[in-house]
Image: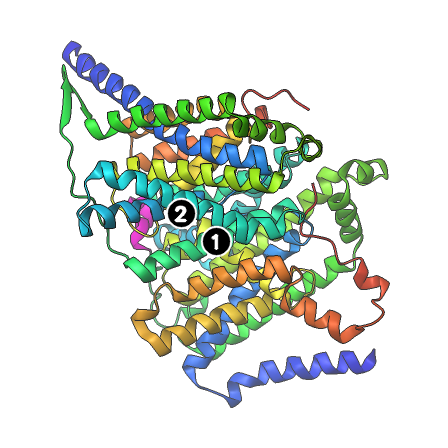
Amino acid sequence: MQSFLNIFDIYLLEAVINGILLGGVLALLALGLNLIFGVIDVTWICYAELVMIGMYGMYYLVQVFHLPYWAAAPLVILLVALLGAALHFLVIAPLLTAPPINQLLATGGVLFILQSFATVAFGIDFRNLGIRLPVLALGEMNFSYARLLSFGAALVGMVGVYLFLTRTFTGTAIRAIAQDRQIMPLMGVDPKRIYLVTSAIGGGLAGLAACLLVLQYDVHPFVGLSFGPITFLICVLGGLGNFIGGFIAAFVFAEIISLGGLFSDLEWGYVLAFAFFIVMMFIRPAGLLARRS
Amino acid sequence: MNRQAAGWIVALLALVALPFVHRDPYHLHVLVLILIWSFAYTSWSIMGRFGLVSLGHGGFMGIGAYVTALLWNHLGVSPWIGIPLSMATAGVLALVVAYPCFRFRITGHYFVLVTLALSGIVLQVITATRDYTGGSLGYTPQRAPSGKGLFALQFDDKITWYLIALAVWIAGLVIWRAIDRSMIRHAMEAISEDEDAAAAAGVNVTAEKLKITLISALMTALAGALYCQYQMFISPDTVSGIAVSLQMVFAAIVGGVYVALGPTVGAIITIVLAEVLRISFGTKAVGWDNLVYGVLLVLFIIFLPKGILGSVIDRIKSPRKPSRGHEQQIVPIARR
């Protein structure tokens, strides 16, 4: 019995740490979505599909054009950033004055477009980079370097965005426009340009997430559906547009999925996470950290 | 007015007579699919037109299909009892999720995302309980022994299915029309304009929203159960989940959510498009139909938010002086 408990604890600890590592990438995804929501007041339902396109970009650059991973990653980040800007320019900009639900549904249309574009262009086969990173054995626990690397890179990315938002003029303008979109044009800030820059940054974060996720998961056209919904739930749970709330919620969700998956199948981890979300919506409808308005 | 009523009756008789004149099984199959999905899209538009944009309907449809099939396969419960039970299950789930949503004033983006979580839950539960539901490989209701087709609600005959689907579709339109003419509609329009003002004017906001959600969820579950009984094969991806929810939203919006036949037009367009692509390009067409849907959805939301039928009817009614009646219908899909 004693030995059983020991093994159990090791697994538990491993699951907890893996949850934290998963939380890093989820937090990165949530940050991009929150940035766009906070500034432009739009939910990109197709956010995970941008990540999917980025993952395919990595696959083609690394596997087909034989670029090294470190050279392919910046190109993909740039590509998805451009995609984000294009999405804003083509779809969101004409709808800026429309009811918010229409904007959300239009990005739902983009979700269809990107998914089926990937199906048509790349086929429905599962693909991977063919890079297998070694596994770190710490005592009796195993962690893959891919996860550690993702966690580290996600943290660096988030710190980078934080510094950009607080230390540069454009970043300050972005934060200001999130607070009051009427007054900022009077202060000499062009909201159209800020929206475009924000969309590009949001896209860039999706690109970074794509570079990290492609190390751990196979790419297929519907891969977005496996982490897209959870990203929205994280953002809503943290309070849409609330960066710190999203950060905390990402780790809460990651732990629920990881621990739920430990005791049963991974799907039950997701079911638990979704159910937890619905219950939390009733307890704190405006997010974990929100003041009730 | 009498001429209009006569027109409806003639159209109805023509639809009933159609399978006895034109017996092509493939055409009938497409028609049955169109009728069943039209009914599902109509159910969505019943609440969608008032700004209650739900992405949880994939969940209700999945419950309708899976509960009916599971009861039949594991307990031998006839779909005649199973379908009402599955509808009740979906209804209870709708109330459990919707009541707190409406009570705590969760609207707009937040409502969409809560309902998104709901369809996510249903999809994951179906996949996770793969020992009973077959998981993502799909599920088939057991064939009834011959002679017990009526008891099992299984018919090989396409004409029977066409008539069943037609009856259900008409019932859906009648419900749509009844709501369109009832006090609920006025209450819901007031709510979608401004909840506080509506409450101040004496509208019980939570109760009205719950009523409309319940009706919509029950109808969607029925659509799911019918789809299951007709196709005799269901998989989590075809009857539940976010993709199905988005498909409902798409078809309803393209057809037009503010007119009774709008969702039907949406269903005709989507299903005919998918079939034409499938027949002319075969397996090469995989993905193309959704690509076209996606582009259309974006274009429609930007340029024709009232949908095809809604815009056409506007044109016909009066290009110069829009009547007051339809002016009221230019409610955007939602306000905050």
Q: Position of residue A245 (x, y in %)?
A: 50, 23
Mark 1 and mark 2: span between their CA atoms? Answer: 9 Å
Segment colored magenta? B129-138
Query: What numbered label is drawn on residue A49?
Result: 2
At 25% across and 27% down in the image, what residue appears? A149
Residue A133 on the magenta segment: no
| Amino acid on which disc 1 is placed | Val
At 40% across and 35% down in the image, what residue appears? A205
Q: Are marks 1 and 2 in contact (CB under 8 Å)?
A: yes
**Quick check: A141 left or right of B320?**
left
Tell which of B59 and B19 is nearer to you. Answer: B59
User: Pointer 1: what residue?
Assistant: A110
> Which quadrant would residue B131 be assigned to in this image?
top left
| SS of the residue under disc 1 | helix
| SS of the residue under disc 2 | helix
**Quick check: B80 left or right of B73?**
right
* Figure check: B17 above or below B272: below
Q: Quadrant of the N terminus of chain B?
A: bottom right
- Chain to which the residue tagged by mark 2 belongs: A
